Amino acid sequence: MTIAFRGISHKFGNQTALSNIDLDVKDGEIVCILGPSGSGKSTLLRIAAGLEPVQQGAIFLGDQLMADAVTNPPPEQRPIGLVFQDHVLFPHQTVAENIAFGLHNQSKAQREAMVKLQLASVDLADMAQRYPHTLSGGQQQRVALIRALATQPSVMLLDEPFASVDTPLRRKLREQARLTLKAAGTPTLMVTHDPEEAMDMADRILVLVEGVAVQLGTPEDLWRSPKGGFVAQTIAGLQSLQGTVQGETVQTLFGTVPMHRIANRDDRALNPSTLKEGATVTLGLRAHTLALKAANGPAVISDRRFLGQRYLTLVTLGDQQLRVETAKQEALPIGTLVEINFASVEALIYS
């Protein structure tokens, strides 16, 4: 069942938290909400859950109104499963009792069968009689997820569910959670501040910046054609560089970028005629498409690091820096004067 947000706007006092948000999440789809702190991510989730009232706009489940400025049922009257960062398991109940908590309308046999099924789905079949405090953080997270799914909610809402778990386990839990949610076929809306997590979990990503939806698309869409600086830097890994339009080039502090190497924000070839001579523009550059050569400057190699799959060379000029990533380690030592070769650069233009 699709959950649809229409024209959702929200304020705290005079501060706008959300501005005219439209979003549909379909059966079996996982949509991650990504954005910087204070962007309105959790506010949208809390409105869907009934923890904040709808001030403006409406939320629909299928073709039925769930909430608007007049109709605002409490969380317990909404067919929604909630999982938060701190899991919120009942400490005085066993794992089985936690999972069965919301199954009031089922017989004892049905509850036991559902508990067994859910535990098996996340490899916790032997944990039924354990108490939450005896479980690891990752196990508690899995119990919280299946407790929410056991009630067969129409929608799942996840708020930073893996934030308190160590990094190696977090990757495994993401995989397991995605498979579990996909198998359940439940529309899922998940808040995260971690771009890697959004790319790993989501079918689509909604990016909020200062309460405004700046982009909605698949992880590949956002990586290939980011709209705006936040998406470019966090999802696509682009670095910003300002320059001035001069004929068929953009002149930057680090050198000349050929116009034919620059795409627009829709990832199409840039039409130079759309830019005024002398205009100041901001480019987003992919670090692995830059090259270095020893020269008389104007830049200098200030640092080098190994990143795992690539080698990073940090190039400094004045108060600005560029990252150059290569498959092989650069032979040029720190302190070498260099120039940037933009001949093969992949660049997007933002202004």
Image (spheres, rainbow, N blue to C red):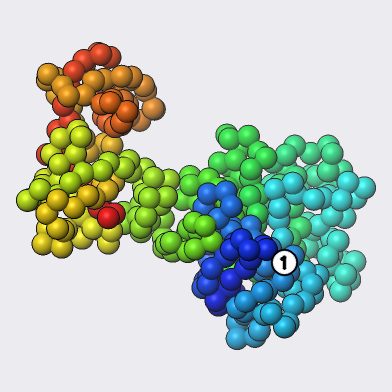
> Residue farthest to the bottom?
63
* Residue drawn 17% across the image and 46% down it: 244
Left or right of 330 on screen, residue 206 = right
Left or right of 325 on screen, residue 158 = right
Is residue 258 in view from this perspective? yes
Left or right of 5 on screen, residue 65 = right
* Residue drawn 15% across the image and 41% down it: 251
Q: 227 or 90, which lies in front?
A: 227
> Residue farthest to the left?
247
* The N terminus lies in quadrant: bottom right
Across and down, in percent, residue 148 comes to 74, 60
Q: What element carries label 1?
A: loop
Above-or-below relation of 345 to 17: above
State the residue position of label 1.
52
* Residue drawn 55% across the image and 55% down it: 39
Left or right of 258 on screen, residue 14 = right
Identify which amino acid the numbered label 1 is placed on.
Glu
Above-or-below relation of 106 to 240: below
Q: 244 or 51, which lies in front?
A: 244
Q: 165 or 333, which lies in front?
A: 333
